[in-house]
Amino acid sequence: MNDEFRHNPFRDSHEDREAARQIPDTPQTRAPSYRLAFADPDFMCREELRPVRLQLELLKPELAMDEAGVNQTVVMFGGARIPDPANAQSARTETLKQLSRYYEEARKFAFMITQEGQKDGRLDTVVATGGGPGVMEAGSRGAAEAGGKSIGLNIVLPHEQAPNEYVTPELCFNFHYFAIRKMHFLMRAKAICVFPGGFGTLDEMFETLTLIQTGRMEEIPFLLFGRSFWEKIINWEALADAGTISDEDLLLFRYVETAEEAMDAIRSWERSGQKRSSLPGR
């Protein structure tokens, strides 16, 4: 935290935490009840403390991004199983081998966004991914290759998922709650790009579309990479024909195939007769 905000007469909590570690070892001091509440993991993990943990998980990344000067983000959702083209032959299905080209498009797109959005050390536009492998790695990698920073919003899973090696360490976060993680994806978002993926990608895509459709989030550029993939797994027109969504809802997103198309789409995005721009200087 920034020390300039600590102009108060009270003893610092860090000092008390350290002092509490130096106390005499007695039955009283060994009792769990004697631990400082904020330094007691068992207490913090109690069921009754869930509201506090939710608040902390919302606040910690928010403060870190504010202090880093992150202004806005371009969010990249996509599958963890999409391979780097260099390793595509090891993919477990032929389809994944074919989808490996989107790894390269994600990498190029993140490079372009970072190169344009991070000039003179300013974090005007920062790529945000889930911080893991596949498309997420490609996004972090492209940002790093452009000499910039990227955000990684990882989550604890039953199987190991370490952050990819390209995420900026001080902007790499770990979550327990999916809901809070998704809030952080969208709180600064000025564009959403969705690459081929599985359940997690679909969850993120549909939640974001629902927020936009219902007016809970402003309309921003929303791009789906890979028209053939998305039209194969989701029959959008059938939803409109059935009346479960309106024809206008089909205008909430646009298909693109390449990084260049995506950049052009973001710059020329139009909605409700107004041109919207999410990139600095546009």
Image (tube, rainbow, N blue to C red):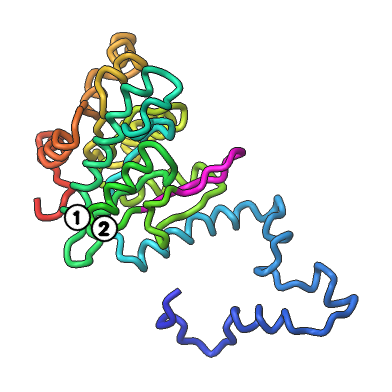
Left or right of 39, for residue 230:
left
Residue 194 visible from this viewpoint: no
Local SS, label 2: loop
Quadrant of res 274? top left
Residue type indicated by callout 1: Gly
Residue type indicated by callout 2: Gly
Local SS, label 1: helix
Q: What's the magenta bit mostly, secondary-structure-wise?
A: loop
Q: Does label 1 or label 2 sit earlier along the sequence?
A: 1
Q: Is residue 117 above or below residue 129?
A: below
| Residue 94 % position (x, y) | 38, 17
Q: Is residue 180 above or below residue 81?
A: below
Left or right of 162, for residue 282:
left
Residue 155 lies in magenta, yes or no? yes
| Residue 132 % position (x, y) | 44, 43
Tally the numbered discs: 2
Q: Is residue 81 above or below residue 131?
A: above
Of residue 53 and residue 175, the one placed in the foreground of this image is 175
Quadrant of the image containing the N terminus: bottom left
Mark 2 — residue?
148
Alpha-carbon distance for marks 1 and 2?
A: 9 Å
| Residue 203 % position (x, y) | 44, 31
Residue 69 lies in magenta, yes or no? no
The residue under the point 57% across, 87% down is 10
Labels 1, 2: front one: 2
Mark 1 — residue?
117
| Residue 47 % position (x, y) | 70, 50
Please say if the residues under marks 1 and 2 sit with CB atoms less than 8 Å apart.
yes
Residue segment shown in magenta: 151-163
The residue under the point 66% across, 55% down is 49
